[in-house]
């Protein structure tokens, strides 16, 4: 893969897969969203009104919420449920995208009721939005990415640009996370689907030739690995999923591409 020096990736001549990536060059492209279970989202405290009586809540508004609170936690992210992620193989639910739309600080608690002040809104908060403890970020000032020391074989669950295809600096969601030993700073690659090529010239018995002619045999179909064409930096890791930013891509990224160890 060609790692010509660019604003986002500084080449390492010793190993093209090991590079210094200044955070300030990519930070604006990183998603702060989370992936949580549906039950965790549904059981999180919820917003149900504000002091001013407005339909929507804005920055610096005082809002009212209800739920089970941790008395030691005062800072919360305001979350709205987004896409549901399903395992491509089993169809079982992996988690729900929690779209972070802002943050809030607890002013007062009284049992399940709480009063909070809203800050850092990306979109107006509305009744039914949820509050989860601020997850924070483990992003360092500079990444020194390294390929994982084990084989990764993951699927793309989502391209967070909202498009069906992606490109450089888009975030992808993959179906592997901390339970699969992935961690922040891992550098993985994208691979095109395998190529299946017919071999109609190899020796075959008369019976095999007949099966081939009527489409009953696939013995003459040979499989070749797809092209590795992009590099992805893992920057947020959850239990069964991870977010990765596409650093470099020689082709359009599609949902059926694989995520592998380079």
Image (tube, helix red, strand yellow):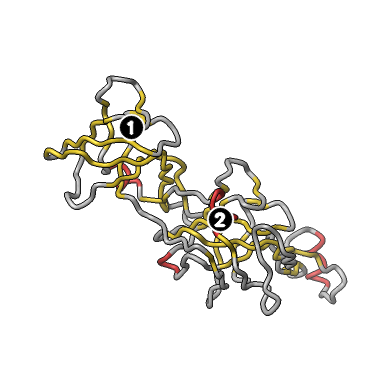
Q: Please state the horizontal and vertical placement of residue 193, each as a whole percent of the image.
A: 68, 60
CA distance separating discs 2 and 1: 28 Å
Say which residue label 2 marks: 24
The number of numbered discs placed on residues in the rendered structure image is 2
Q: Tell me which numbered mark, 2 or 1, is placed earlier along the sequence.
A: 2
Quadrant of the rendered image containing residue 82: top left
Q: Residue at x 23, y 34 (%)?
A: 65
Determine crowd level at label 2: few under 14, some 14-19, many 20+ residues with C-alpha closer than 10 A: few
Between residues 208 and 201, which one lies in front from this camera angle? 201
Determine crowd level at label 1: few under 14, some 14-19, many 20+ residues with C-alpha closer than 10 A: few
Is residue 156 found left or right of 45 in the rendered image?
right
Between residues 189 and 77, which one lies in front from this camera angle? 77
Between residues 56 and 89, which one lies in front from this camera angle? 56
Is residue 61 found left or right of 167 in the rendered image?
left
Please tell me whether mark 1 sits on a helix, a strand or a loop: loop
Please tell me whether mark 2 sits on a helix, a strand or a loop: helix
Q: Residue at x 56, y 51 (%)?
A: 171
Q: Residue furthest left?
A: 111
Position of the C terminus, as image quadrant, is bottom right
Position of the N terminus, as image quadrant, is bottom right
Q: Please state the horizontal and vertical placement of residue 231, each as a whole percent of the image.
A: 64, 63
Between residues 199 and 123, which one lies in front from this camera angle? 123
Is residue 83 found left or right of 50 in the rendered image?
right
Q: Please state the horizontal and vertical placement of residue 76, each as a whole percent of the image.
A: 30, 45
Q: Is residue 145 above or below residue 39?
A: below
Say which residue label 1 marks: 60
Q: Residue at x 27, y 30 (%)?
A: 62
């Amino acid at each position: 893969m060609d790692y010509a020096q660019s604003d986002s990736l500084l080449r390492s001549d010793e190993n093209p897969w090991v590079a210094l990536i200044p955070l300030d060059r990519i930070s604006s492209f990183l998603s702060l969203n989370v992936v949580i279970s549906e039950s965790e989202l549904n059981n999180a405290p919820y917003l149900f009104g504000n002091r001013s009586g407005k339909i929507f809540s804005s920055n610096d508004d005082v809002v009212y919420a209800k739920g089970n609170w941790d008395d030691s936690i005062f800072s919360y992210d305001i979350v709205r449920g987004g896409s549901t992620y399903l395992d491509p193989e089993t169809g079982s639910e992996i988690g729900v995208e929690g779209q972070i739309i802002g943050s809030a600080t607890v002013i007062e608690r009284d049992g399940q009721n709480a009063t909070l002040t809203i800050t850092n809104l990306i979109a107006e908060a509305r009744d039914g939005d949820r509050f989860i403890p601020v997850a924070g970020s483990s992003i360092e000032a500079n990444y020194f990415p390294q390929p994982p020391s084990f084989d990764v074989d993951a699927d793309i669950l989502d391209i967070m640009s909202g498009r069906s295809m992606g490109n450089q600096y888009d975030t992808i969601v993959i179906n592997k996370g901390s339970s699969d030993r992935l961690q922040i700073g891992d550098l993985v690659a994208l691979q095109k689907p395998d190529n299946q090529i017919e071999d109609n010239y190899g020796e075959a018995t008369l019976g095999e030739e007949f099966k081939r002619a009527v489409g009953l045999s696939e013995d003459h179909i040979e499989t070749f690995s797809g092209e590795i064409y992009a590099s992805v930096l893992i920057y947020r890791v959850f239990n069964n999923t991870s977010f990765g930013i596409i650093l470099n891509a020689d082709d359009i990224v599609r949902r059926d591409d694989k995520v592998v160890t380079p």
